[in-house]
Structures are given as structure tokens and as C-alpha cells.
Image (tube, rainbow, N blue to C red):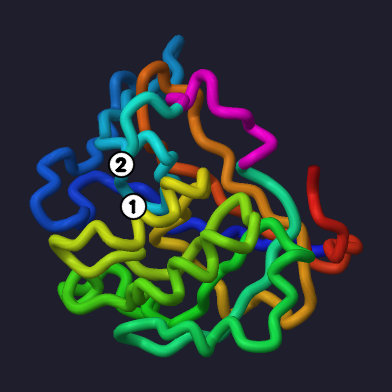
Amino acid sequence: MTLIDLSHPLATGMAVYPGDETTPVISRLSAHGEGRHQSSAFTSGCHAGTHIDLPLHFRAGEPALEDFPVGRCEGTAVALDAPEGAIPPEVLAGVDLAATDFVLLRTGWARHWGAPQYYRDWPWLTEGTALLLAEAGLKGVGLDSPSIDPFGVETAHLILAAAGLINIENLAALDRLPASPFRFAALPLRLAGAEASPVRAVAWVGDGGDRRGG
């Protein structure tokens, strides 16, 4: 079994979604020395880096993170190749969506991480693709770009939120994932009242991940 980290590191001053002013800051409160130890503080917006969006992000009355079932953040996943730009429904052709919990869309956009291009014209779900995913009984959808929608649009978010799906955005290292199903988890911090959280997304490869999670 191999454990693959699918998360980007959070760092002080890193780029975030356009218009988001809550850039992460990691502050050193104390450093190693005689009679001392290292201690740090962390502040950030909830949507920074690799993170999940709950349905609450776009639907009032949905559970916040402290009440959201953690089991809905892990399960069996498949990674599918998808084009840059608008991701069409054809990427799902021939895939048994009923046999998996998560669909991770691999566009290659993560290669722009840390460059200005990353937050410009990123890959996103068409309405038709979002509808097919929403109807499949999944737990969530992830991709290696900043958002499942283009900038200023909410269509895919609204469709998936209405179906109870979580979104995992800014995934990394999807090129390391196999064609066969695998186990996946993107566990959020239990932030009271919050609709999103940075996650350490991981995949277990080679552990019999063809069984759909409960």
C-alpha cells in the first residue's frame, strides 16, 4: 500500500482565490534555544490551498463543519483525465459512478501552482457535467484547479451543493493516481459554524479501494 499526499503546502503570503483577502500567515511565536521550544501561530481563510467546500457554502441551513459527518469526507475514488477549460460530460463516459464515492478530475492544472496563471482561466465543470455528477449519488468531486466554476460563476457549486456533495479544490499530484479505484480522504478541521476548511487530502493506492465506502 502506498499513501499519496494530494495537498499543496500552506505558506505565508501564498496566492489565494481572486478577491480573497485572507492570505495564510504562519508566525513564529518562539524558537529553539536554551530552555525554549518552537511554537507557531496560523491564520488563514477557510478556502485557502487544498480545501473542501461543504454544501453550506452555497445553501443556508446545511450542516457546518462541527456537525458534518466525517464519513462523508472519505471513501472510494476514481481519477479521470479531463481537459483544460470547460470539462465536458464526455469525461464520465463508461465510468460506473454508482461504484464510487468520489470523482477526482485530473487536468494537469496543478503544474501552474505558485504562478500567476494558476488563478487565470482554470479548468471548470460544465453544467452538464455537474448535473451528471450530482445525479450519481457521490459523496464529492475534486479537481486540481481553484474552483469547479469559472470566476464569478456559481452554477456547478449550486448543483452539487443541492445534491449534498462536497467539493475538493486545489488538489495536487493527481498524476500519481492509478486508473483503478483507490481509497481517498480529505478530512477538514472541525471549525464551528464554518462552511469550508483546508484539508490534507490523501489517497491509499493498492489497498483494495474498489469497495464503495459507507
44 relative to 151 in the view: left or right: right
**Could you say where residue 193 lies in the image, as x and y percent from the top left?**
36, 19
Name the one closer to the observer, 95 or 113. Answer: 95
* Residue stretch rendered in magenta on the structure: 63-72
Q: Which three-letter amino acid code belongs to the residue tagged 2?
A: Phe
The one of 35 and 5 positioned closer to us in this rendering: 5
The residue beneath circle 2 is 58
Q: Look at 30% across and 41% down and name the residue there.
A: 58
Three-letter code, disc 1:
Leu
Q: Residue at x 43, y 25 (%)?
A: 64
Assign a secondary structure to mark 1: helix
Residue beneath label 1, please? Answer: 158
Horizontal and vertical percent for residue 196?
38, 37
Q: Is residue 68 left or right of residue 181?
A: left
Label 1 crowd (10 A; few <14 / some 14-19 / many >=20): some
Residue 151's place in the image compared with 20, above or below, is below
- Compared across the picture, whether 136 is left or right of 200 comes to right
Q: Quadrant of residue 102?
A: bottom right
- Residue sitting nearer the eye, 107 or 161: 161
Point 45% across, 10% down: residue:
35
Q: Residue 7, relative to residue 97: is it above or below?
A: above
Marking on residue 54 = none
Instruction: Measuring from the top left, give residue 134's x and y in whole percent.
Output: 52, 60
Between discs 1 and 2, the one toward the N terminus: 2
Between 134 and 197, which is closer to the camera in this rendering?
134
Assign a secondary structure to mark 2: loop
Identify which residue is drawn at 49% across, 56% down. Answer: 7
Residue contact between numbered discs 1 and 2, judged by CB atoms under 8 Å? yes
Q: Quadrant of the N terminus?
A: bottom right
Q: Image check: 123 left or right of 177? A: left
- Asked where in the image residue 144 lies, by quadrant, the reply is bottom left
**Rendered-image quadrant of the C terminus:** top right
